[in-house]
Amino acid sequence: MRWTVHGERTIYDSPWMDVRLADVELPDGRRFDHHLVRVRPAAGVAALDGAGRVLLIWRHRFITGAWGWEIPGGRVEDGEDPAESAARELVEETGYRAGPLEHVLAVRPSPGLHDGIHHVYRADGAERIGEPTDVEAERIEWVPLASVPDLAARGEIGSGATLSGLLFLYARSVSPG
């Protein structure tokens, strides 16, 4: 059952987000205002080494007040390809340059609230080329991919895009093909 959108208007706009109010109608005829957020796409990369480990950052998110493991990533800039964004963010946040990239997932973390899409890439290997220039992490570590289910169960992976990407890669590693 498809909703009908009669229009949208901006309530607040910034380079980060556009908060909007949509005039929507349900298939049964009920009509109401629905809040939504328009955001730029994001991209991140799970860099894997040859020893079954993934390069992660341990960081604090002030909005939730929580610490957690994340793949390096961030918003896709105007005119930038998501793969370029993912590779750029890896260098900025970790000091590592990604090996060959493969797009593995496009995650829409909260489609009932915002239109955000998070592109998750896998990199085969990463080379240390210097220090991070965008310091967002308390720690940068190679974490065993096999530990991802336990980290998730303990609530140590708070990002939905990171969790989706890592569990996808873990599932592929235990059941290839």
Image: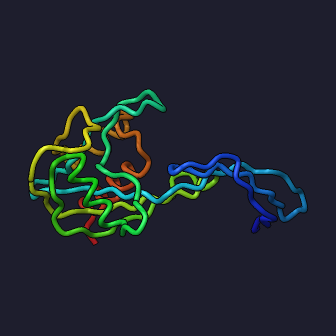
Judging depth in this view, the residue of 57 and 93 nearest the camera is 93
- Please, which residue is most extreme toward the bottom here? 177
Image quadrant assignment for residue 153: top left
Residue 54 falls left or right of residue 85: left
Q: Residue at x 66, y 51 (%)?
A: 36
- Please, which residue is most extreme toward the top here? 65
- Please, which residue is most extreme toward the right here? 29
Q: Residue at x 26, y 43 (%)?
A: 134
Q: Position of residue 138 (x, y in %)?
A: 24, 32
Q: Position of residue 94 (x, y in %)?
A: 19, 46
Q: How many marks?
A: 0
When the figure is inspected, residue 18 is found, relative to residue 124, above or below; the finding is above
Q: Position of residue 37 (x, y in %)?
A: 62, 51
User: Quarter of the image containing the C terminus?
Assistant: bottom left
When the figure is inspected, residue 84 is found, relative to residue 141, above or below; the finding is below
Residue 100 falls left or right of residue 158: left
Image quadrant assignment for residue 148: top left
Q: Position of residue 69 (x, y in %)?
A: 30, 39
The image's colour scheme reads: rainbow
Q: Residue at x 16, y 65 (%)?
A: 99
User: Quarter of the image containing the N terminus?
Assistant: bottom right
Residue 100 falls left or right of residue 8: left
Judging depth in this view, the residue of 6 and 2 nearest the camera is 6
Judging depth in this view, the residue of 93 and 158 nearest the camera is 93
Residue 65 falls left or right of residue 22: left
